[in-house]
Image (spheres, helix red, strand yellow):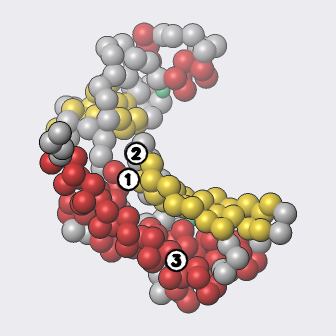
Amino acid sequence: MAKIIDLQKYRKQKESSFWVENVENLIEGHLKYRCPYLIYEIVYSNSMYHNLGLCSCKTKGKYKYATFKFSRPFFEACQKTGNYDDMWDTVLHEIGHAITYYAYGAGHGHDKVWKSIMMMLGGRPEKSTNAEFFKPYRYIYKCPYCGNETKTLRKYMKGVACGKCCRNYNGGAYSTEYILDLICDEGKVVQSW
Ligand SMILES: [Zn+2]
Ligand SMILES: [Zn+2]
């Protein structure tokens, strides 16, 4: 029987394998000698929009573990725009966390120790990656009461109210007073404030 290849799917796999392989190589290259006994895994999340990367570490018995989690939409956006610097910055940032944990234990966050590791790696010792261009949301809603802005990918149903205000001022019950205004629709500003 003929094998039907879903070209779209095939191309997608091929495209994404470009950075998957490179991210793996970068991580392995840095950790191989510096953290020889670290057990790590790399995970790509389809729903990570607020964090570009995360590194969670733990110790179990005599082994240290690290999980690298990266935002697939972010990496795909990097590939689309050719902006690989932000991608490598993000990966290096998380490698810095893993090395810091391996060598100095937990609780360092973005402190001096982590910063010095970042300098050694040749990465930017900054708290977050500069990814200004990464704005995958399509809608922005604003609460007319507290001014809180919510960025979403999906359009809300009409009449969705600000959860924070309903909680804080209405005992958690829904109130039309706090109905969110749509201020940005598919990138177009609906109303300026
Ligand atoms: Zn960090
Ligand atoms: Zn509010």
Question: Where does residue 42 sit, x and y in percent of width and height?
Answer: 52, 61
Tag 3–tag 1 contact (CB < 8 Å): no
- Give me the C-alpha separation between circle 1 and circle 2: 5 Å
In primary-sequence order, the first of circles 3 and 2 is: 3
Q: Amino acid at mark 2?
A: Asn
Residue bearing the label numbered 1? 72
The image quarter containing residue 2 is top left
| Residue at disc 3, secondary structure | helix
User: Is 68 on the left-hand or right-hand side of 154?
Assistant: right
Which residue appears farthest toward the front when viewing the image?
1
Quadrant holding the C terminus: top left
Q: Amino acid at mark 3?
A: Glu
Residue bearing the label numbered 3? 28
Q: Residue at x 64, y 77 (%)?
A: 99
Please determine whether, in this image, residue 118 is positioned above or below residue 41. Answer: below
User: Is 107 on the left-hand or right-hand side of 190?
Assistant: right
Which residue appears farthest toward the right when viewing the image?
61
Residue bearing the label numbered 2? 46
- Give me the C-alpha separation between circle 3 and circle 1: 19 Å
Disc 1 beta carbon < 8 A from ligand 1?
no
Question: Where does residue 51 sit, x and y in percent of width and height?
Answer: 47, 53
Tag 1–tag 2 contact (CB < 8 Å): yes
Please determine whether, in this image, residue 173 is positioned above or below residue 147. Answer: above
Number of numbered discs visible in the structure rendering:
3
Label 2 crowd bin: few (<14), some (14–19), many (20+), radius 10 Å: few
Label 1 crowd bin: few (<14), some (14–19), many (20+), radius 10 Å: many
